[in-house]
Amino acid sequence: MKKSMLLVGLALALSGGAKAGEYTNNAGGIVADNSPLGLTQTITGTDAGVISSVSVVLNLSGGYNGDLQAYLAYNDGSASYAVMLLDRIGGGSLAASGSGFGTGATTTDYASLSAAGVTLVDGAGSSIHDAAPGAGLAVGVGTYTPDSTMSFNSVFTGLGGSGTWTLYIADLAGGGQSTLVSWGLAVVTVPEPQTWALLGGGLVLLLGLRRRR
């Protein structure tokens, strides 16, 4: 009976090893107009295992989207890695780039943030750089690839899930002022390779013992 229960537990661990950690930063802040110093905020990840995929949600109001440049950096305790999120999308004018990302509504948790913001993730159908909807309109709630030559997966996959995520966002041209209402992350992690090996080896051993009995 005990061996059967252990077999079930190991099978569940092997089949359901991926876990998603969801984080939200609702501190908000003004992005200083025409200043490369920008606004910096952090989120501390507490996920066990190694990173499998990452998505970022931005929720901003006002300003000119075409003035904004933003990066996501991650430090896993040994080194820092960064990916560009926004690179002055649409060319720097209100008519070309719109004003705000998502709805700019107040959020309290990751669910409300996802409903109000713009999600950046690998493999989306269109690039955030091509998401300019027209004069005076925010980039609507939706899912886009980040404005970068590097994918999230190529930079963050395989790093330890317990580390510090840093969002840097700056306004690089005069006129208009953007406000970061909230932002967040969904980080999917899987067990480290040695954990998979131990679980797999234990499962094979117990299956062998069961067959002999």
Image (spheres, rainbow, N blue to C red):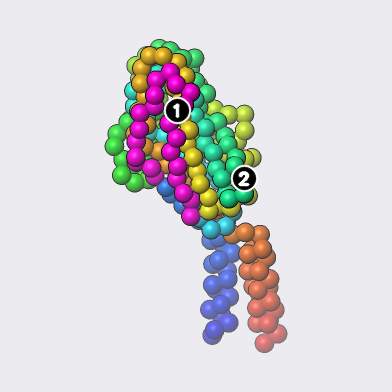
Q: Which residues are magenta?
A: 24-46
Q: Position of residue 194 (x, y in %)?
A: 66, 63
Residue 142 versus residue 208 in the image, above or below: above
Residue 38's disc is: 1
Amino acid type at image mark 1 = Gly
Residue 132 versus residue 124 in the image, above or below: above
Name which quarter of the figure residue 195 lies in: bottom right
Q: Give the dominant element type of the magenta stretch: helix, strand or loop.
A: strand
Q: Position of residue 130 (x, y in %)?
A: 50, 21
Q: Residue at x 50, y 43 (%)?
A: 165
* Residue at far left of view: 106
Amino acid type at image mark 2 = Ala
Residue 156 shown in magenta: no
Residue 164 visible to the viewer? yes
Residue 18 versus residue 203 in the image, above or below: above
Local packing at callout 2 (Cα closer than 10 Å; few below 14, some 14-19, many 20+) is few
Q: Residue at x 49, y 14 (%)?
A: 91
- Quick one: 162 or 209, which is closer to the camera? 162
Name which quarter of the figure residue 132 lies in: top left
Which element carries disc 2, helix, strand or loop?
Answer: loop
Q: Position of residue 182 (x, y in %)?
A: 36, 37
- Cα distance between the residues tagged 1 and 2: 22 Å
Q: Position of residue 145 (x, y in %)?
A: 53, 32
Q: Residue at x 64, y 40 (%)?
A: 154
Residue holding disc 2? 79
